[in-house]
Image (cartoon, helix red, strand yellow):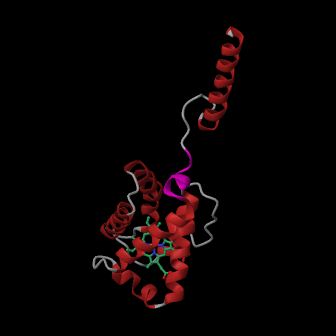
Amino acid sequence: MKKSIAGIVLILAVLVGVSSAPLLGQSGATKEPSLYMRLGEKKAITAVVDEFVARVAADKRINSFFAQTAADPARLKAFKGKLVDQICMASGGPCKYTGKDMKSAHSGMGVSGADFDALVEDLVAALDKFKVAAHEKDQLVGALGPMKTDIVEKK
Ligand code: HEM
């Protein structure tokens, strides 16, 4: 009997060890799944981008920048696709963003710091609509934030 209890304890210990192993880093610290996984993969990112772009299009502070994009369905679709790929890649997903780098993409537009902040506000509102948690929101905004210096051209 003692032997079989010891056996069960051993089996349980092995099972716990195996099941927790993928979540442990080399140091033994808990390792998070990628931000991409936590956001809900490509399907959820696509839904967030749809909502985000709709909010930008309705945002009087910045929608004039997107007048030509919004007026051309093929251009709008391509733009959304690039945003999805960019967010997917930046969050550790399997996509490859093949659009322009941020400096060339926004060169000559005259985007200001306030314009940039307005767009980030629209993104946060879209993430809120889908109840993305604060930690994931912070990580995504944190990944896009450093692009500000390449995008903003005026005060
Ligand atoms: C973190 C912030 C931003 C990100 C990640 C971002 C991302 C992008 C991407 C991926 C493209 C497509 C590039 C390509 O065609 O290859 C793009 C284009 C564009 N962006 Fe941004 N952008 C940001 C901020 C802004 C801001 C603040 C504005 C203006 C208020 C803006 C206005 C535009 C416009 C007008 C286009 C052209 C859209 C088109 O193809 O018709 N962006 N952006």
Above or below residue 32? Residue 66 is: below
Q: Is residue 106 magenta?
A: no
Quadrant of residue 126 within the rendered picture = bottom left
Quadrant of residue 2 within the rendered picture = top right
**Residue 83 point in image, percent of width and height:** 51, 70
Q: Where are the magenta residues, as a range?
A: 33-40
Main SS category, magenta section:
helix
- Outermost residue on the top side: it is 2
- Outermost residue on the left side: it is 60
Q: Is residue 60 left or right of residue 140?
A: left
Q: Is residue 37 magenta?
A: yes
In this orientation, which residue lies closer to the viewer: 91 or 108?
91
Q: Is residue 57 left or right of residue 61?
A: right
Question: Residue drawn at (70%, 15%), measured in percent from left and top?
Answer: 4
Q: If the image is split into quadrants, where does the N terminus sit?
A: top right
Q: Is residue 84 left or right of residue 117?
A: right
Above or below residue 151? Residue 58 is: below
Question: Residue drawn at (37%, 73%), measured in percent from left and top?
Answer: 111
- Outermost residue on the front side: it is 1
Q: If the image is split into quadrants, where does the C terminus sit?
A: bottom left
**Residue 30 point in image, percent of width and height:** 54, 34
In this orientation, which residue lies closer to the viewer: 120 or 108?
120
**Residue 22 point in image, percent of width and height:** 64, 38
**Residue 70 point in image, percent of width and height:** 43, 86
Question: Residue drawn at (64%, 18%), measured in percent from left and top?
Answer: 9
Above or below residue 94? Residue 80 is: below
